[in-house]
Amino acid sequence: MAQAAPVLNHSKPLKHGHNVKRHTGLMDWITTVDHKKIAILYLWAGGLFFGIGGLEAILIRIQLIKPMNTFLNAQLFNELITMHGTTMIFLGVMPIIFALMNAVIPLQIGARDVAFPFLNALGFWTFLFGGLLLNLSWVMGGAPDAGWTAYAPLSTSTYSTTHGVDFYTIGLQIAGLGTLIGGINFLATIITMRAPGMSYMRMPMFAWTTFITSAIILFAFPAITVGLVLLTFDRILGANFFEVGAGGNPVLWQHIFWIFGHPEVYILILPAFGIISEIIPTFSRKRLFGYSSMVFATILIAFLGFMVWAHHMFTTGLGPVANALFSVSTMLIAVPTGIKIFNWLFTMWGGQVRFTTPNLFAAGFIPTFTMGGVTGVMLASAPADFQFHDTYFVVAHFHYVIVGGLVLGLFGGLHYWWPKMFGRMLSEKLGKWTFWTFILGFHMTFFVQHFLGLMGMQRRVFTYLPNQQFDLLNLISTIGAGLMGVGTIIFLTNVFLTSRKPVGALDDPWEDGRTLEWSIPSPPPEYNFKQTPLVRGIDALWKEKTAGNKGMTPAEPVGSIHMPSATALPFVMSVGIFIAGLGFMFSRDDFGNAFMSFIFNNYIVTAIGLLITFGSMVLRSVFDDHGWHIEPEELEEG
Amino acid sequence: MIAVFGLILLTGCGRADLSALRPQGPAAETSYGLMKLSITIMVIVLLIVFSIAAFVMIRFRRKPGQSEIPEQVEGSIKLEILWTVIPLILVVVLAVPTVKAVFAAGNDHWNDKNAIKVKVTGHQYWWEFEYPDYGITTAQDLVIPKGKDIAFELKTADVIHSFWVPSLSGKLDTNPAGTINRFSFSAPNEGVYRGKCAELCGPSHGLMEFKVKSVSEEAFQKWVDGMKKPAAVLLEDPALAKTFKDQCLKCHAVGDQGISVGPNLTGIGSREAIAGILINDDSGVEGASVEENLKTWLHDPKSVKPNNLMPSPKDLGLTDEEIDGIAHYLANYKLN
Amino acid sequence: MTTAHAEAANGTLPHEPEKATLEGRNKVLAFWLFLGGEAVLFGTLFATFLALRNQTNEGPTANELFHLPLVAAATFILLVSSLTSVFAIQAMHRNRPAVLRNWLLITVVLGLGFLGLEIYEFSEYIRHEEFGMTTSAFSSAFYTLVGFHGAHVAFGIVWIGILIAQLSRKGLNVITAPKIYVSAMYWHFIDVVWVFIFTVVYLLGKVG
């Protein structure tokens, strides 16, 4: 098993020529380029940050449990809301989305790996180190406090004097780089690595939404990178992009932020649409209703997503023409979204719906997400938004979309693919408890917030005066948040108990699996498919099943399988960027220590970091990775 | 869910002087009208989706022993067209009044001779109101004549704030120079309305409140005249008067004395609240007496509004007696 | 894949060696995608520059600052370097490693010339015109946009330099060919970006 040979520059592979270096333990995880292991890394890291963001949310809700509460001070509260938003979006849910994409997409399209295993690892490690950098702020002088939107001038060094916002700008640039790399990788993977017969219009919906999401990432993330660079330059180099006194323009930040920020919303929700579109057909035993219109709707949502950003800025004062245009374009998004909702409902129509845990989450998703969707349309009406904007109505709306939509989708997806990822079924009983506590807690927390907003409670307030009729609703909301916490704890218990069970999940543990990932063992071998499958229609495995075949028909004879080599370079490169970022951030500080001040103030630390990163790139370029091979005999043994 | 609904009905729709659901002026009415229209449409949509969802989830549950394969329906073009066209129609129904209201809200009354002009400046964490036509400046309490269009020009002295009086109108941001905003609203009835800052502006963002006082035209004129009068004798105790002048008036103004770096204090005794949030209520229900509130504020301003820019009078060397004396003086500094 | 390797081993290259392997095709495709992202990056920087280009804060204006002859010379050098990298790829397709290497060398030298002119230009502004990063919103936008491009050129020079070294050591094969091909794509891209910078920053600065 541990033997293979470099074959390049030889006309014949030299079998068993060299030993392949295989790592174990921690080194295995640091050096892995296997998409399935990277998926697990994304899941644990995303889970960790999701937990941190969840704790922040609980603290926020405790502070708001009653008027004029003194549980948290105002500054800490602002740091918590900033970090809650930033952590949840960039470090919590996006990595878990990437975890599912990594775990599932290559399997669903019948590929042995992603197009760029090395870049895949690099994307993960840069995300992780960016996230760690951002969270280091808690222990290094204070977290960012200008909101996750970091509006200038509040986020400039004049008004936010700690390093908090620097951690935000630099941490997000590094994490964003990882996301961008991941996006490009999945685009290329889906374009070039599909199994024979899998045309675009035979791809599973989750592959489609991953494809479109990756395209949005590609075109949205560079914009926020530029925004963050400008803010960094303002704060550290004394540039004037947002300095009004020197001609800068704070409204420019809002445009750049939301040109990224709105597509980001679809980066989050489209994968959830994909997950739901996998779960519902499986547990209805029916193919997805209106597949081609679902694909079309996804593309349309992504397209419209880029031309609605200013609806976040109706109260900035853009004038009636802009407000009218962006109102109408935003409302239009309701149309493709509605198409999706009805197609899911009609997938169940006439089917045999089985309420397993994944399907409970999917079934809960539909009405909950619809509620978030309709408040979105309400917000699109600019003159009404003059009232809604920056109130708890908006908080309720986006939590309905992101938690009621995406997080329910992610929970559904995790329960659904857990056996495929880990070879163990999560407990159905605990899963159902997770669902009911979480969704009840969710509606308790956020439904009342619509009314708080309409009754005059603005968002991001660390406390509120009594006698405003806010007290009871806030109390309900806090209790609900506690219930969501309980749901999450039940899920973690489920994960822990399941991890102690032996690996024993079937290839197709839900029995009605329709797509390629259910045609191979759980968890899959490191090469995924011994023979690349031949795809003969949409829902490839289902098609074979109904034709009476036991599994997929192979598209190739059994042969030697080329595998990429494990490498620590992605990890080292990310460490380099991390050091460079930290060095740049503190380049203007006086450390009270001549040596420290010298190496930071002269950008020596930054240079060392960059040297590590670029040096690793050179190494990667100069020493070609020839990979290694798994031979047919070894496949038989396995 | 029903229990939650019930609770919400019990609490009503919020305070009349604060809630966007109880509009007290035409601008808020417009927003409220659109809210009602959109909520109606959306509730219909929700009912349809919920009904279909409930139906399929109950009717098409897999029954024990059921093993035949359901028909694999590809889709239906008729249905797809149906649920594309109907939402489109609903969107148009909402979009037309929206666009109309957007352009109506864009009306600029700044050059309207009958409108009262007010320049609003947001500060961390208080509001400054300048009446250019009358040459007066005040803070925290925006006094307006009822029924008249009030034309606002909004700007900020520091970070972005958002000027919001929910019961009278939607909000608009106060931006730095170069992106100054104008809009207008009116209050047909007399009354006091609560205003808030709606854009995160620092630690005390949540406490950056103000009041809008809609009064009769005569009362407004009287108030303007009172504001224009030179300040009366500062304080009877000459030593305290000197302290007040040397310390307080370095940032504040009373009548024609002092400068307006901090909030203008002219007639502070007759305002609705101290620092925007310590509500003056002699009955003690919603707050405390003016003098008590002033004492609370002056003894430790940072504990009332974290990170506000006012130095603590104690740090400036004022004794407790001096602070109480100044509080007493300010509490009795009324306009009428 | 094996056939391509066999040809490489025999000293003959497939017609388009950069696309002969799956890895090569993936690399070219992903690089196109990457350039799409880069286009958004520069687009945002251009938008920022356009929004702030008249905010000179009583510092030098574009019209006072720019000397078109110098910039025109830099433009000419970079355009020629784009042409030489086309010649390089043509040589690669004809399987002429030595010619390829020479064209790449000329490209690098031209790139260095461009970079030298840019550094000279910046230092003139900073030393003689008191026009630095902190002068005005216009200066910040100028240095960030043009500097980002300059950093791209510098990265490209180092990159192509390393590829020249690899070419000498490993020869031209299906591994090195895609690398050279995407570096040429990159070089054309920064050339195109420069054309926009020349127009939007310099010409518009002189005219508008």
Image (spheres, rainbow, N blue to C red):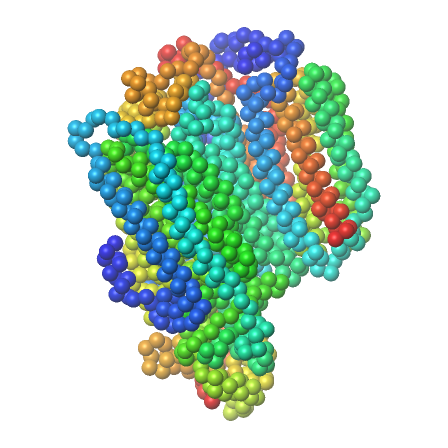
Q: Is residue A503 above or below residue B292?
A: above
Residue A140, percent from left and from top: 50, 50
**Which quarter of the rendered picture does the N terminus of chain A lie within?**
top left
> Would residue A302 be found to the left or right of residue A225 on screen?
left
Residue C76, percent from left and from top: 79, 36
Q: Is residue C11 above or below residue A191?
A: above
- Residue A450 can be seen, yes or no: yes
Q: In this view, which residue lies farthest toward the right?
A: C69
Residue A550, percent from left and from top: 30, 17
- Residue at 73 percent across and 60 percent down: it is C58
Q: Nearest the camera: A506 or A285?
A: A285
Residue A115, percent from left and from top: 50, 26
Q: Is residue A334 above or below residue A288?
A: below
- Residue A111 can be seen, yes or no: no
**Which quarter of the rendered picture does the C terminus of chain A lie within?**
top left
- Residue at 36 percent across and 26 percent down: it is A539
- Residue at 41 percent across and 54 percent down: it is B93
